[in-house]
Structure formats: C-alpha cells, structure tokens
Image (cartoon, helix red, strand yellow):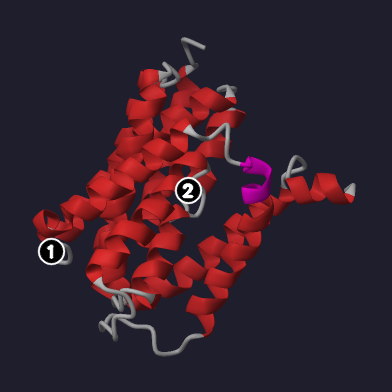
Amino acid sequence: MTDIALHLLLLLFLAAFLAGFIDSIAGGGGMITIPAMLLAGIPPLETLGTNKLQSLFGSGSATIAYARAGHVRLGEQLPMAALSALGAALGAVLATVVPGDVLKAVLPFLLVGIALYFGLKPNIGDVDKHRRMSVFLFTVTIVPLIGFYDGVFGPGTGSFFMLAFVSLAGFGVLKATAHTKLLNFGSNIGAFIVFLGYGVVLWKVGLVMGAGQFLGAQLGSRLAMTIGAKVIKPLLVVTCMALAVRLMWDPAHPLRLWMGF
C-alpha cells in the first residue's frame, strides 16, 4: 500500500489527535489509532509498524510537557527508558514465538482488574506513597517486562505502567502518568526500530497521524497537570473498561472463537 486518499488522511489525523489526548492522561491511545488504520484499509502488519511511528510523537510530546513541568527528570530515568526500549524490541522480534491468542484472551480481564483497582481504591491521589520495590529491581524486572509486552501486542501498555508505578513504586497518580509516558516513549522506539527493519512503516500516514498525536498529547498532558488525579483516575478507569469491551467485541477475539460466538 503506497497511497491513501486525502479525506482518509484527515480522518486519521483526527483519530490520532483524540488518541494523543487520551493516551497522555490514561493510556489506551492504540484503542483508537489501530482500528482507525485498519478501517482505512491499511494491512495489519503495516498498521502495527505505522502505529509505533505515530505513537512516538504522542508519547514524546507528553514526555516533554511533563518534564518541562518538573514531574519527571529525564536524565535520571533514561536507564528505565532504555530497558523499556530493549524489552519492546525483543518483544517485536519474538512476536511470532509468543502465544498471541493467549495474550488477547487474558488482556480484557487484566484491564478490568486495573480499572477496579483504580476505581475502588480510595486513597490513590497525587501524593507519593510507600515504595514496595527498590528502584533497581523495578527497573530491571517490571520495566522491560511491560516493554516486552508492548512490542509483542501493545494495547493497555500505559495502563500496566500506571499500575506498576502506583502499586509498586509508590508514585502518586500524576507522577506515575508522567513517568509512564517516558517509558512508553522508550518502548515505542524499541518496537519501531524493529518494524522499520522489516519495512512495514507507512511514512506519510505515520507523520500525518504523528502531528495529530503531538497536538493531542500537549492538550491532554496540560489538562492532567492542571487537574491531576481528579481527571486521571476516572479517565483511566473508563479507558481500561472501554479497551476491554472493544477487545471482547472483536469477532476474532480468541475467547469468542473458542466459545463459538
């Protein structure tokens, strides 16, 4: 596929803008961009590769906004971002080995669990809590593991990073959101490099959507920093539930195929 109609490019730009806005606050932007590209007639493999290109603009834009406001120190967090990128690269390379159907079957239940955790736990706010895992252990285990998942499959990566930062690293919701975008940027780079090597990136589509992602992420991150947990928590819950429903609604979802409906 070498060309795409102008009106489809415009719709993809708008989809990316909305995805960047939501993703900069709660994650889950792929829930919008991947179906949009598939509906535009882009083949699945090119959709995954191009999605990583345009996602770089959204996660990068949000990272810059949060860093400028002092919510994340880029220099101190680069090792985490590097390991996230390494994990994602390995995940993208080994995607054919990992049982994708199992991941797709389990993911909706994991997302519902994350939504319930953030929705029902009353003391989650913008203030940091007690850390349950050392920085070193968190960096060398949890970060590359989630990055690996992003390279293999992807949807919900931001939600998993959020859960890890809040429940294990003791971060407040706003700080967790800021660091999530940095590590998501790292995982996007790692997977993008692999997909680029396979030649499955549509540059025109990716750059047009990247512009939408950048603008949407700027707006979303500024809203998150203004309102904090009051907007992040409910949007995270809604995003996780919506992503779970969308995955289960897919006629090709493994559970629906296994159960015969």
Image position of 208 with respect to 157: above or below: above
Q: Secondary structure at mark 2?
A: helix
Mark 2 nearby-residue class (10 Å; few <14, some 14–19, many ≥20): many
Give amino acid for label 2: Tyr
* Residue 205 percent coordinates (x, y): 41, 24
| 30 on left or right of 196 | right
Closer to viewer: mark 1 or mark 2:
2
Residue 155 visible in the shown view: yes
Location of residue 35 by image quarter: top right
Residue 208 visible in the shown view: no
Give amino acid for label 1: Ala
* Residue 33 percent coordinates (x, y): 49, 39
Magenta stretch holds residue 96: no
Residue visible at 72% across and 45% down?
Answer: 250
Residue visible at 17% across and 63% down?
Answer: 72
Q: Is the Cβ of the residue at disc 1 closer than 8 Å to that at disc 2?
A: no
Residue at far right of view: 260
* Residue 121 percent coordinates (x, y): 48, 86
Q: Which residue is mark 2?
A: 149
- The Cα–Cα distance between marks 1 and 2, rounded to whole angstroms, is 29 Å
Residue at far top of view: 2
Magenta stretch holds residue 100: yes
Q: Which residue is mark 1?
A: 69
Image position of 112 with respect to 39: above or below: below
Name the chief secondary structure element in magenta.
helix
Q: Which residues are magenta?
A: 99-104
